[in-house]
Amino acid sequence: MLQEFKKFLLRGNVIDLAIAVVIGTAFKAVVGALVANIVMPIVGIIGGKPTFDDYTITINDSVIRWGSFVTAVVSFVIIAFALFVMIKSFERLQDLRKGAADTAETNEPLTVGEELLAEIRDLLKAGGTGTPAPPA
């Protein structure tokens, strides 16, 4: 049982997931600071208050804090946009790397065997056999 647990923990997926959680937590802190210290003060300039947290509706003795929800939505949208930009940048970088690798492969000179195979391929495409075979 202990061996299985150790094997489970040392699998690549679990370690990758743990790294993702740590990075995600740090990323949330950075975006939270961005929202609290930059975005919301700009909202305060426009709307009069630097945060939506004070906006509430009171019905009987129940308080609905809809402003806190709006603040969370703003934070979520910023996080989603930042992740979108990061993923698109990563994909573009991988495409550039793949393109560079493809051009590096195509710029290499062909070996003698590859040249012969290319000639045979071209002859087969043309439907000919090249030179006629000598009579036996």
Image (cartoon, helix red, strand yellow):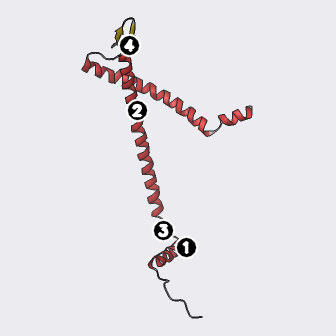
Q: Which residue is mark 4?
A: 64
Q: Check disc 4 and give the amino acid type.
A: Ile
In depth, the one of 132 and 28 nearer the eye is 132
- Residue at the far bottom: name it: 135
- For marks 1 and 4, the one nearer the N-term is 4
Distance between mark 3 and mark 1 Cα atoms: 12 Å
| Residue 110 in picture, x, y percent from top left | 50, 69
Q: Which residue is mark 2?
A: 80
- Please tell me whether mark 4 sits on a helix, a strand or a loop: strand
- The quadrant the N terminus occupies is top right
Q: Check disc 1 and give the amino acid type.
A: Gly
In depth, the one of 32 and 135 nearer the eye is 135
Distance between mark 2 and mark 1 Cα atoms: 52 Å
Measured along the vertical axis of the image, is residue 122 above or below residue 81?
below
- For marks 2 and 1, the one nearer the N-term is 2
Callout 4: few (<14), some (14-19), or many (20+) C-alpha neighbours within 10 Å? few
- Please tell me whether mark 2 sits on a helix, a strand or a loop: helix
Q: Is residue 71 left or right of residue 4?
A: left
Q: Check disc 3 and give the amino acid type.
A: Pro
Q: Which residue is mark 3?
A: 109
Q: Residue at x 48, y 68 (%)?
A: 109
Pointers 3 and 1 in contact (C-beta within 8 Å): no
| Residue 99 in picture, x, y percent from top left | 43, 55
Q: Residue at x 40, y 42 (%)?
A: 88
Measured along the vertical axis of the image, is residue 132 above or below residue 74?
below
Q: Which residue is mark 1?
A: 113
Measured along the vertical axis of the image, is residue 94 above or below residue 22?
below
- Residue at the far front: name it: 60
